[in-house]
Amino acid sequence: MLNMIRMEMYRMFKTKCMYIIWFILAAGILFTTGLSAEEMKTFSMEEKQEMYEYAMGKGESDNVNLGMDVTVPTKPGENVSVFDLFYANIKGKFIALFMVIFTVLYTTADLTSGYVKNIAGQVSQRGGLVIAKAIALFVYTVMSLLIFFLCQTLSNLLFFDEFTFGPVKQFAAYVGIQLLLHYGLLLIVMGVAIALRNNVISMVIAVCFCMNVLMIFYNFLDQLIAKLGVKEFHIVNYTISGKMLMLGMDISAKTASASIAVAIFFSAAAVSICSMIFQRRDV
């Protein structure tokens, strides 16, 4: 098992697209932060209040829109903090979009090239290869969020007159929970990619996760459940993408425990199902 983990880690760090995606991510953060800084200087207090109310009011499950929406949740009269922009980009799934694209490319690289055939026959439990991929993706998730944090901090230093970090404890709690949720999303995308073994279709599905396209399907199921007599039930509240979107800056113990439970459940389910598929499939 240790050798499989080493192999996947080596393969991941030798993947050129990982560094390209990180570079584009860093450039995107610098560019969007610069635009946000210029916009905040031109906004009136009324416009800032409207933007703040819009950003903080997006947590309701019945107000989720399609597409990617990055809105800075800064109160009028206050400085834009690192936490504000970190929260806006995470909530809008701007960072998740880059991460799922890499996950599809990394997961299917050895499948499409035929490399996996050289090693699958040498291990008794091929499901271990999936676990090794999952461990490598956890390292990737941690490093991606760390790079994002460093780029966002640098961007705030460059483009805003006054540097504000934000409440440290709330920031740490938010980052920790979002790390688990993003990791869960990547494992789901990994499972989809391994099951389909098709880069294009897997990429489309992964992007749909980040663009809230599945909200259409969730709303349809909510309507069916409502007809059965269950009112005020929203499936999005129990999904990885929904928790990523609706996790607020001020996290309560109940919200934290619910988000962690969803992340663990979907992560375990994705790895388990994916391992069974890989174990039984003729590679």
Image (cartoon, rainbow, N blue to C red):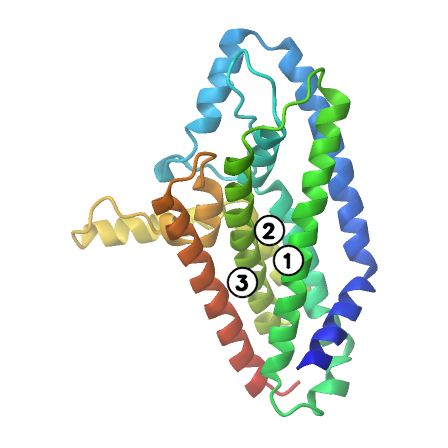
Residue at label 1? 203
**Residue visible at 65% across and 74% down in the picture:** 132
Amino acid bearing label 1: Met
Taking the image as drawn, is residue 198 in sight?
A: no
Q: Label 2: how many residues lie within 10 Å, few (<14), some (14-19) or many (20+)?
A: many
Please, what secondary structure does the residue beneath circle 3 have? helix
The x and y percentages for residue 227 are 20, 51
Please, what secondary structure does the residue beneath circle 2 have? helix
The x and y percentages for residue 130 are 61, 75
Please, what secondary structure does the residue beneath circle 1 have? helix
Q: Is residue 237 left or right of residue 31?
A: left
Residue at label 3? 188
Amino acid bearing label 2: Val
**Residue visible at 20% across and 46% down in the picture:** 231
Q: Would you say the residues marked 2 and 3 are in contact, meaning their CB atoms lie under 8 Å apart?
A: no
Residue at label 2? 207
Rendered view: 232 above or below 121 = above
Q: Earlier in the sequence, mark 2 or mark 3?
A: 3
Res. 134 image quadrant = bottom right
Determine the CA span between mark 2 and mark 3.
12 Å
Determine the CA span between mark 2 and mark 1.
6 Å
Res. 282 image quadrant = bottom right
Towards the viewer: 96 or 219 = 96
Amino acid bearing label 3: Ile
Taking the image as drawn, is residue 110 in sight?
A: yes
Q: Residue furthest left?
A: 229
Q: Is residue 198 left or right of residue 10?
A: left
